[in-house]
């Protein structure tokens, strides 16, 4: 299979949001990343062609994110294919079960994965979540309720939580 075939093309597009410009990255069938301005496009340095064009997955993701930011969507319905370890994928799947407008602690998320003692590992996995907002790692907070790390910054995390509570 050569790099020009659709399975090897990475598609990207940017959108404006209340939190600044976001870059969405997809392959032929699924969303792979939602990137903040400070994040480089993964895969851009490994000779995979990147096409910025009209793409059904990206168009759906942009539409659903716009609905989310407008207060019209609470759950995303998109094909996702984040790249990660088995533990990261399990942690990210657990994030999708956190209800809109609520928060849980890293320990609570680890407990849902079967071992509360893995709270730090969960935090590390969440920090590597490539599809933030859609895979809502912003809904996980410290044991005291304090806001902790987020790829988009703590101000963005606070904004997202406030937005969901309105």
Image (spheres, rainbow, N blue to C red):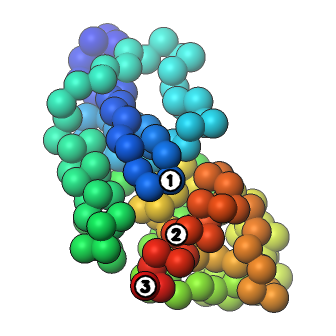
Q: Decide: few, some or many residues near mark 1? Use Cα within 10 Å; few <14, some 14-19, many ≥20.
A: some
**Pointer 2 residue:** 160
Looking at this view, is 152 or 120 the one in front? 152
Label 3 residue SS: loop
Which comes before the other along the chain, label 2 or label 3?
Answer: 2
Compared with residue 46, is residue 144 higher up or lower down, i.e. above or below? below
Which comes before the other along the chain, label 2 or label 1?
Answer: 1
Label 1 residue SS: loop
Locate residue 75 relative to residue 56 in the image: left or right.
Answer: right
Distance between mark 2 and mark 1 Cα atoms: 9 Å
Residue 148 placed where, x, y %?
76, 69
- Residue 164, quarter of picture: bottom left
Residue at point 51%, 21% (across, down): 44
Residue 150 placed where, x, y %?
67, 59
**Pointer 3 residue:** 166
Looking at this view, is 34 or 27 the one in front? 34
**Pointer 1 residue:** 19
Looking at this view, is 49 or 133 the one in front? 133
Compared with residue 101, is residue 59 higher up or lower down, i.e. above or below? above
Q: Nearer the viewer, mark 2 or mark 3?
A: 3
């Amino acid at each position: 299979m050569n790099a020009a075939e659709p399975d090897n093309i990475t598609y990207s597009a940017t959108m404006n949001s209340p939190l600044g410009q976001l870059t969405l990255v997809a392959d032929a069938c699924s969303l792979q990343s939602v990137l903040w301005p400070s994040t480089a496009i993964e895969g851009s340095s490994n000779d995979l062609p990147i096409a910025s064009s009209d793409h059904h997955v990206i168009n759906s993701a942009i539409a659903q994110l716009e609905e989310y930011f407008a207060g019209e969507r609470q759950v995303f319905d998109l094909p996702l294919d984040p790249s990660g370890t088995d533990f990261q994928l399990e942690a990210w799947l657990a994030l999708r079960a956190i209800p809109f407008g609520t928060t849980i602690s890293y320990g609570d998320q680890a407990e849902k994965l079967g071992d509360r003692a893995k709270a730090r590992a969960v935090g590390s996995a969440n920090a590597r979540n490539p599809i933030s907002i859609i895979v809502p790692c912003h809904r996980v907070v410290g044991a005291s309720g304090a806001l902790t790390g987020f790829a988009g910054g703590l101000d963005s995390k606070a904004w997202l939580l406030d937005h969901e509570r309105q």
